[in-house]
Image (cartoon, rainbow, N blue to C red):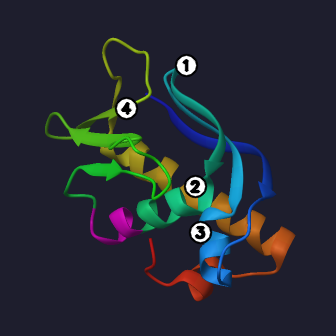
Amino acid sequence: MTISLSFDHAETTGSYPNVAYQLLLGIEADFRLVVDCQEVLYQPHFPIVELRQWLAAWLGAGTTEDFIYTSIEAEETGLITFRRVGETEWAVDSAWSTLVQPPTVELQCLTCACKQFVANVDFWVAAQLGLDVQQVLGDLR
């Protein structure tokens, strides 16, 4: 089982009242979530730092609860969800997915992919903007 959370063509957009919200919502990219070659979600102009914050909080809380990501800027609940379906299996889904059955992945693979996404976003922000996401945002999400 493989899972990938990736982004391309990241850029800063919009104008927000302060640096924290500019960082949280003002960086968008083409986002892709793939499990075993099945595209669960592809979304252009996706707020990758906001997702990064949600994933970091979920990882920090111990990954024992289901993960349900809902963007501040979206009307739909569950843009990305990870739901426990067995002892170590998690279903990976999206409110926008067209898949009939959500694919499953082992928790270890899921957490590794989430940690890698967080690290990739942090690296991009540091390299492009000279900012430390954790220092600017703390627990804001």
Instruction: Farthest residue to the bottom: give it.
Output: 135
Residue identifier under label 2: 116
- The disc labelled 1 sits on which kind of residue? Cys
Tell me the mark number nearer the camera, choosing from 4 and 1: 4
Q: In terms of depth relative to the viewer, which is nearer, 41 or 59?
A: 41
Q: Are marks 1 and 3 in contact (CB under 8 Å)?
A: no
- The disc labelled 4 sits on which kind of residue? Ala
- The disc labelled 3 sits on which kind of residue? Leu
Q: Are marks 2 and 1 in contact (CB under 8 Å)?
A: no
Quarter the C terminus occupies: bottom left
Residue 95 x %, y %:
37, 32
Q: Residue drawn 68% across and 83% down? A: 19
For disc 1, the neighbor class at 10 Å (few under 14, some 14 to 19, many from 20) is: few
Left or right: residue 52 compared with residue 17: left
- The disc labelled 2 sits on which kind of residue? Gln
Per the model, the C-alpha gap separating discs 4 and 2 is: 23 Å
Identify the element where label 4 is drawn: loop
Q: Are marks 4 and 1 in contact (CB under 8 Å)?
A: no
Q: Residue drawn 48% across and 53% down? A: 114
Q: Which residues are magenta?
A: 57-62
Q: Which of the 4 quarters of the picture holds residue 62?
A: bottom left
For disc 3, the neighbor class at 10 Å (few under 14, some 14 to 19, many from 20) is: many
Quarter the N terminus occupies: top left
Q: Main secondary structure of the magenta part?
A: helix
Task: Work out whether mark 4 precedes mark 1 in sequence or the reverse, and give the earlier one.
Answer: 1
Per the model, the C-alpha gap separating discs 2 and 3 is: 18 Å
Task: Work out whether mark 2 precedes mark 1 in sequence or the reverse, and give the earlier one.
Answer: 1
Q: In terms of depth relative to the viewer, which is nearer, 10 or 25?
A: 25
Residue identifier under label 1: 37
Identify the element where label 2 is drawn: helix
Residue identifier under label 3: 24
